Amino acid sequence: MKHFVSVEDLQAAQVRSLIARASFFKNGGTVPQFSEPVYASNLFFENSTRTHCSFEMAQRKLGIQTIPFDPSSSSVSKGESLYDTLLALNSLGIQLVVIRHSKVGYYRPLINPTEHQQLKMGIINAGDGNGQHPSQSLLDMMTIFEQFGSFAGLKIVIVGDLINSRVARSNMELLHSLGAALYFSGPSCWYSPEFDAYGQYLTLDEIISEMDVVMLLRVQHERHTDENGFSTADYYEHYGMTLKRYARLKDDAIIMHPGPVNRGVEFATELVEAPKSRFTAQMKNGVFMRMAMLEAVIRGRHLGGL
Ligand code: CP
């Protein structure tokens, strides 16, 4: 593929192939050898630990030359647009960019060749506002596949700050297309009727004992204009993974969280690394899935002699 910006158009076969490739890398499979250098840059206009560092780790493991880019010390601070920034980096020889940006769909004009004739670089979306987070979604698919070996018929509940979450949006689209039975839970102020197309909105305690996967979301205070009287104690009581709820999970159920975790809000602190939690497995898988995604774009653009 030429760009990797969304899960919207991914077919089931592509998801399985990316999981197989990421698992191959995870199990020590040989990385492709470039016959000429591949240059990339990571542009994070929103903060990140996992996504930024794991893309960088994936790039190092693949042998990509990564040119550092810090928005706060770049000419973005002088008012240079995202497009002109990319045009500059592309002119210097950078062929791939990984971008995280607060604007939903920032990538659409950038990947439209009729709007921009001279920009010739692969764009990988590392998260756009509450739009898409394809690398998180695919590492989540890998983690679920490792546990269950399939998606069809799995019962999965996504819990919490649904409306502000790009992880929720990408995962509901992908899991629905892969045949999982989806459920939603969380405060009604963070639910939207548009999610009805993907699953049922229920209270967590009604369904928790039937779920194969409980996917917790971070409460995204930085995106709330009005906290609607939010109380961490109330949230934890109604939607948190407490010891009591953990005890009601099926034997082979798993708990997921994209991170960062608000301990004691979405997740009891003593459960973050509990046997059913896949919190660290998700982060480990992220490196290998991002290797598979980078490789797909490198091959799609015939970079590095591939
Ligand atoms: N899950 C996730 O995107 O984490 P970071 O914000 O730390 O990258």
Image (cartoon, rainbow, N blue to C red):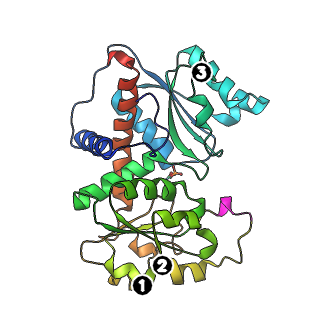
Checking the image for residue 206, the label placed there is 1
Q: Main secondary structure of the magenta part?
A: helix
Rendered residue at 40%/33% (across/down): 294
Image position, residue 199 (x, y; %): 44, 68
Q: Amino acid at mark 3?
A: Leu
Identify the image quadrant of residue 220: bottom right
Q: Is residue 121 above or below residue 53?
A: above
State the extent of the magenta-drawn residues as a range: 221-225
Task: Indicate the position of residue 22 as horizontal and vertical percent values.
Answer: 29, 42
In space, the residues marked 2 and 3 are separated at their CA atoms by 47 Å
Give left or right: position of 84 versus 177: right
In the picture of the structure, the residue carrying the numbered disc 2 is: 202
Q: Does 117 appear above or below 203?
A: above
Q: Secondary structure at mark 3?
A: helix
Q: Are marks 1 and 2 in contact (CB under 8 Å)?
A: yes
Identify the residue under disc 3.
89
Q: Are marks 2 and 3 in contact (CB under 8 Å)?
A: no
Q: Residues within 10 Å of mark 2 (few under 14, many from 20)?
A: some
The amino acid beneath tag 1 is Glu
